[in-house]
Amino acid sequence: MTGTVIARETCGSEVQQSYVRFENSDKLYVVKRWPRKWSSLRAIFSEIFLPAGYPDSVSRDYTEYQIWDSIQAFASSITGTLATQSVLTGVGVGDQGASVLAATTTWILKDGMGMTGRILFAWFQGSNLDYDSKKWRLFADILNDAAIFLELMCQYFKAYVTPILCISSVAKSIVGVAGGATRAALTQHQARSNNMADVSAKDGSQETLVNLAAFLFSLLLLRLVAGNPWLVYTIFISFTLLHIFANYRAVSCVVMETFNRSRYSVVVRHFLQKGGGIAPVGWVNARESVWIQCGRPFVSINLGVPLSAIAPTSEELLCRMESIPGGKKAMPAYLLAVVRDSSRHYDINIVLSSESTAKDQLEAMFHAFLLEAILLKLKVDADHPWAANITSVENAAEDLSSDDHRLVQSSRAMVNTCFPLLWKALEDSEWKTDHVLFGATEWRVTWLDHVGETVSVGDTLGSKDL
């Protein structure tokens, strides 16, 4: 008796079944292919700890990132356990002369400082966590190691245990904000099937399993290191180095297709040096810096400044409008100005229109990165297709001591030539251009194409000269 297979279906990558209809029966029979025992165990593990539909429902870098993330979580749990023992000793646990009230007060102050630090950090840096998620994730974990080190010192500085715990609590609160926010950004990147909640939940399950394993290991470790401070610090340093290395590898393996400043800078630099062509997504991510920059950069790019920052007078505004295609009658998507201070550092200030799109921001940042590259002495061969344009902009940059109008006009002419080529290449690439993460402020200018609005003297009482 023969049958005809009319359909097959799968549940994940392990369970498959076929629907068979036999000649003398109208009934459909289900033929299942069950996985082997070891495969069944793997399927159960995947169902508990991996997102549904793995690996098709997540990004290609998911597995490598989660492996390194689990290693760093294990290392952090070990060092945290060592610090907990020191903190308890520092606040007087086991000391008959210690005051319960003093220990309680210390704990309340510690928690209060942590809450305050959490609020202030979210206020100052909240918007930056989106577009520099890799940098802030690594920064948060290094700061966490510093906080654990401070807690490890508590048993040796009992007289200063309160300020030490307050400082470490502030640091850990910053870690909580930065780590939580950047984890959300990375989860959004990893979720490829509208399954962000599932990816986030399974990430929490994985971390819980790793922490549980670390706690069991710590129970054995604490007995081993009891009364041996040199062994404590040897283990602390070893696991801290492992923690930092694993975090570095974790954020370095993430391959994002959206543009932030660092990734777009690499793309623009490659485009200018090669005279065209878009750098691959993986190549760019491998060259993206994951370290927070300290100190003032030689060239600072300020995206989304108020109009008064580049045009304090109406005459200055008209001069800047002349540099754009269409002249004074045009409604530009952005205006740009270059300022050099007494220390020979440069500020590139960009005003954005209220009508500006993601493409307009890409063009504005292309203009800024072009100027940055030339101010940093971009080197190209004589046969480079844009050698003449680059030379023209370089010559204009030499006259920046008087004003920046010539520099802006010459660079704008090069942008008008090069950016359309870049945009077309981006549309044909893997890069996502529907939204960008450049950290622009909320300032937007609305251009009025009619006679200016009438204002009375009373309306200007709150104004100031620019």
Image (cartoon, rainbow, N blue to C red):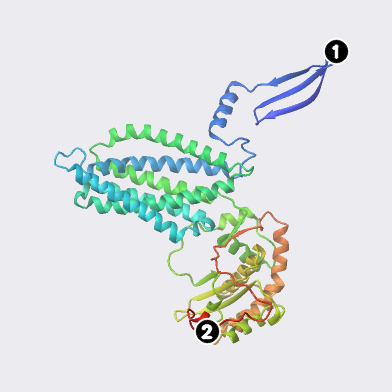
Residue 141 in view in this figure? no
**Quadrant in which the N terminus appears:** top right
Q: Secondary structure at mark 1?
A: loop
Q: Residue at x 35, y 51 (%)?
A: 114
Image quadrant in which you'd find residue 39: top right
What residue appears at the point 56 percent right and 25 percent down from the top-left corner? 41
Residue 410's disc is none
Q: Earlier in the sequence, mark 2 or mark 1?
A: 1
- Local packing at callout 2 (Cα closer than 10 Å; few below 14, some 14-19, many 20+) is few
Residue highlighted by disc 1: 24
Q: Position of residue 133 (x, y in %)?
A: 51, 54
Q: Nearer the viewer, mark 2 or mark 1?
A: 2
Nearer to us in this view, 394 or 73? 73
Q: Quadrant of residue 352?
A: bottom right
55 above or below 299?
A: above
Q: Position of residue 271 (x, y in %)?
A: 66, 65
Q: In the image, residue 29 lies at what x, y percent?
A: 76, 18
Rendered position, 72 above or below 277: above
The CA distance from mark 2 to mark 1 is: 96 Å
Q: Position of residue 53 (x, y in %)?
A: 63, 35
Left-right relation of 396 to 22: left
Compare residues 390 and 87 and report the one nearer the observer. 87
- Amino acid type, callout 1: Asn
User: Which residue lies under the disc numbered 2?
Assistant: 457
Q: Is residue 463 above or below residue 137?
A: below
* 10 Å crowding of disc 1: few (<14), some (14-19), many (20+): few
Q: Is residue 117 above or below residue 343?
A: above
Q: Residue at x 59, y 52 (%)?
A: 256
**Residue type beneath disc 2:** Val
Outermost residue to the right: 23
